[in-house]
């Protein structure tokens, strides 16, 4: 086999068999917890041990996904899982939470760490920082161009892994809050309900469409260029896909990778054969995404921001639509659904995918029965699906292959499981980089435009957190600019969490100049940001997108160059208090008001869709904001816990943020907001986000309702 690694998903034992049988060099799979595909079948412990033994005998590798953030109360369970994995020795674990880095390095050094794409690493600076702390491979963010990948390779020695095939997210890797905001089902917790695949309604003119549903990635023609760029591993997405899909895609990419180095004609032949195979994968339309695009952050020229990857008329479902279920009959074990007869007639043995109408579940199902009449079809459906749910054909029986099983039939000898150990207690050290006077206690206001600085001076906050965009950069670095209403010492510059390689050179020039001009306080939101501030006078705050949900993450981030952190927007009070020791609460900022960026998109969609306000099927409203820095989708209903400030102060917290960035409040709205802060009264028509109920759990599914801007309707959040 070629030395380049072809890495395939194994969401089930059948998919594992298909991946290996079709030629994958390695597979990645999840167990029953702490992985970013909690809605897939995943593996029982005995199955995992059997898979590990079978793959070792075949000379293939196995990586385990532990790629979600964890709360402090889950530290024991995570420690138990890591100890179990260390006793078995998989070829690596794929992680998102920064807290796993010190935990694994100190207690389980035999485990090899790979950084998940959910870590949002898109620059050589980010790769190199993680490499310094023992990360041997980084799965790069998917929004990169080929030139950027090549440049990252030139500036790092770490192994680089890229996705080459499968579903895409419209939001930048690891930065989607949409599903979490709607009901606590966080993408950072493996519970994403795929808000990007939903049908939305715009108002002027009134139309509907799948405005944020991307096409599927297909880079089979780019494999030679990626190899030349120095990519180590080629990853296929699809732990929720059928075994047939996995086998089909792996076989196509196997052909091309094996043809590398065999001459141009052999490579062309392999690519054409691979493309022919992929025509039968029954997925969405295909795109090369951003691989052919190059960026010049200092250019005003607008490039085609969506090319072929975003189509409003493209259904969010995978496969060929067969229609919605019209009727159901039969007991749960033999349940059938009536669907309309369309151009494609499925048969027993074909695989379909069912989507609940409310998007609460999506499941693959192999048809055991199909009964045809003149106009309709009765098909077998799994328990839990009903009238109105959608059905898609994803594979036909004729395409199904039988693969040799990887897992032994008898798993009686595999009886290990995580124990009941307690995680070691980590005590966060006291401040080492200045005391709390660096960022005094009080109220800070976040804005995204220079114009907003003039608006908020009417009720002057202690400090201003200004989003550092291309537009604000031009103004701050202008030599003869008009005087601003806040001094450089009062302004904290907030760096964007999506930090691509194309922006590296720009920031390397601008940040020293900003420091020379007196801007000495920054909010960093990406691991790659820290290296800009070595040996400078700048003081740093770790932003909410570094996802400090536990003490281990707090300790790691603190070691990078800051004692101050901003609690993640998804956090809840109980976890916040567990994470922040009483003596560390003076170094913790809490966002008490915000319009959370639900999607953060590396493209300016404002000229593509030409609309701002839109809503979903539940009449919850949102706003699309686009410019040359990219696009944000924010909720019409803001998040607010301003009335909780006195209680938080009693608990030892003293630094609070009103984040109005991304939304232009009028001066009257701002004064109303400040009045609510000063008087500790709830703002009507706002959301608590996850503050009260925490992340979604089946046993206590919270009921969150949305509404509108707090000045427009009476009422208050619960």
Image: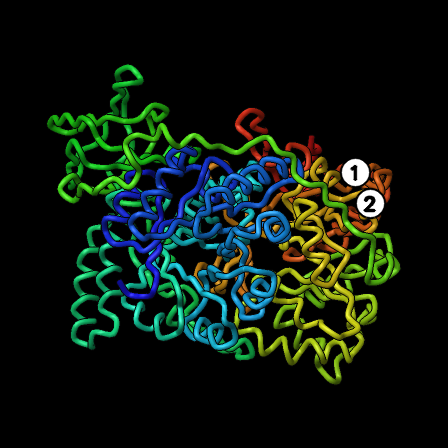
Give above or below for 249 relative to 54.
below
Return the residue at label 2: 653
439 vs 353, left or right, is right
Q: Position of residue 156 (x, y in %)?
A: 51, 72
The residue positioned farthest toward the left in the image shown: 374
Q: Nearer the viewer, residue 389 or 346?
A: 346
Q: Are marks 1 and 2 in contact (CB under 8 Å)?
A: no
Give above or below for 173 relative to 416.
below
Question: Which of label 1 and label 2 is nearer to you?
Answer: 2
Q: Position of residue 635 (x, y in %)?
A: 58, 47
Q: Position of residue 664 (x, y in %)?
A: 67, 57
Image point 68% across, 49% down: which residue?
594
Image point 46% across, 49% down: which residue?
202
Return the residue at label 1: 644
141 vs 506, left or right, is left
Name the N-terminal-most of marks 1 and 2: 1
Distance between mark 1 and mark 2 Cα atoms: 11 Å
Q: Nearer the viewer, residue 241 or 181?
A: 241
The quarter of the image holding the N terminus is bottom left
The residue positioned farthest toward the bottom in the image shown: 479
What kind of element bears circle 1? helix
Q: Nearer the viewer, residue 146 or 599?
A: 146
Give above or below for 331 relative to 623.
above
């Amino acid at each position: 086999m070629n030395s380049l690694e072809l890495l395939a998903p194994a969401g089930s034992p059948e998919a594992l068999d298909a991946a290996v049988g079709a030629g994958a060099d390695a597979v990645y799979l999840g167990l029953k917890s702490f992985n970013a595909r909690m809605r897939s079948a995943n593996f029982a412990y005995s199955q995992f041990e059997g898979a590990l033994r079978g793959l070792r005998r075949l000379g293939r590798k196995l990586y385990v996904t532990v790629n979600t953030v964890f709360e402090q109360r889950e530290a024991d369970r995570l420690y138990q899982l890591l100890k179990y994995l260390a006793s078995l020795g998989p070829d690596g674990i794929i992680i998102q939470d920064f807290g796993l880095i010190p935990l694994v390095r100190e207690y389980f050094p035999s485990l090899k760490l790979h950084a998940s794409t959910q870590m949002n690493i898109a620059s050589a600076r980010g790769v190199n920082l993680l490499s310094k702390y023992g990360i041997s491979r980084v799965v790069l963010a998917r929004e990169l161009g080929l030139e950027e990948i090549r440049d990252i390779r030139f500036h790092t020695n770490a192994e680089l892994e890229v996705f080459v095939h499968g579903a895409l997210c419209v939001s930048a890797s690891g930065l989607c809050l949409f599903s979490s905001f709607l009901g606590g089902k966080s993408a950072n917790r493996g519970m994403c309900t795929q808000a990007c695949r939903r049908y939305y309604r715009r108002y002027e003119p009134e139309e509907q469409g799948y405005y944020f549903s991307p096409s599927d990635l297909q880079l089979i023609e780019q494999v030679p260029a990626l190899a030349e760029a120095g990519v180590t591993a080629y990853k296929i997405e699809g732990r929720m896909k059928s075994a047939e899909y996995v086998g089909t895609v792996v076989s196509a990419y196997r052909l091309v990778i094996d043809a590398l180095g065999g001459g141009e004609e052999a490579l062309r032949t392999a690519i054409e054969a691979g493309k022919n195979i992929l025509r039968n994968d029954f997925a969405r339309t295909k795109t090369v995404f951003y691989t052919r695009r190059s960026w010049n952050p200092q250019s005003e020229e607008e490039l085609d921001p969506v090319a072929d990857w975003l189509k409003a008329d493209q259904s969010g479902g995978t496969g060929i639509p067969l229609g919605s279920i019209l009727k159901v009959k039969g007991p749960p074990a033999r349940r059938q659904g009536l669907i309309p007869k369309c151009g494609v007639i499925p048969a027993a043995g074909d695989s379909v995918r069912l989507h609940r109408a409310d998007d609460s579940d999506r499941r693959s199902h192999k048809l055991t029965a199909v009964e045809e009449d003149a106009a309709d079809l009765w098909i077998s459906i799994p328990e839990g699906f009903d009238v109105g749910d959608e059905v898609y054909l994803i594979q036909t029986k004729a395409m199904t292959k039988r693969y040799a099983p990887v897992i032994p039939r008898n798993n009686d000898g595999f009886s290990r499981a995580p124990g009941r150990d307690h995680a070691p207690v980590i005590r966060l050290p006291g401040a080492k980089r200045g005391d709390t006077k660096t960022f005094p206690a009080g109220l800070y206001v976040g804005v995204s435009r220079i114009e907003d600085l003039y608006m908020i001076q009417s009720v002057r906050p202690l400090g201003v957190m200004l989003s550092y965009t291309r537009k604000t950069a031009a103004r701050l670095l202008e030599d003869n600019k008009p005087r601003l209403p806040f001094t450089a010492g009062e302004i904290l510059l907030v760096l964007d969490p999506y930090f691509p390689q194309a922006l590296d050179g720009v920031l390397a020039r601008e940040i020293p100049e900003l420091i020379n001009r007196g801007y000495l306080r920054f909010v960093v939101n990406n691991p790659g940001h820290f290296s800009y501030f070595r040996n400078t006078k700048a003081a740093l705050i770790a932003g909410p997108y570094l996802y400090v949900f536990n003490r281990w993450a707090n300790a790691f981030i603190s070691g990078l160059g800051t004692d101050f952190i901003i609690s993640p927007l998804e956090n809840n009070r109980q976890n916040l208090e567990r994470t922040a020791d009483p003596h560390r609460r003076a170094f913790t900022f809490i966002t008490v008001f915000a319009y959370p960026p639900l999607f953060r998109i590396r493209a300016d969609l404002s000229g593509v869709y030409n609309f701002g306000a839109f809503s979903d099927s539940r009449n919850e409203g949102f706003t699309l904001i686009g410019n040359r820095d990219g696009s944000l989708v924010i909720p019409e209903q803001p998040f607010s816990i301003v009335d909780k400030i006195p209680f938080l102060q009693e608990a030892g917290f003293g630094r609070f943020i009103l984040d109005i960035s991304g939304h232009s409040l009028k001066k009257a709205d701002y004064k109303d907001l400040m009045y609510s802060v000063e008087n500790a009264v709830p703002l009507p028509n706002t959301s608590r986000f996850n503050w009260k109920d925490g992340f979604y759990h089946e046993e206590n599914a919270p009921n969150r309702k949305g509404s509108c801007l707090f000045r427009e309707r009476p009422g208050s959040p619960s």
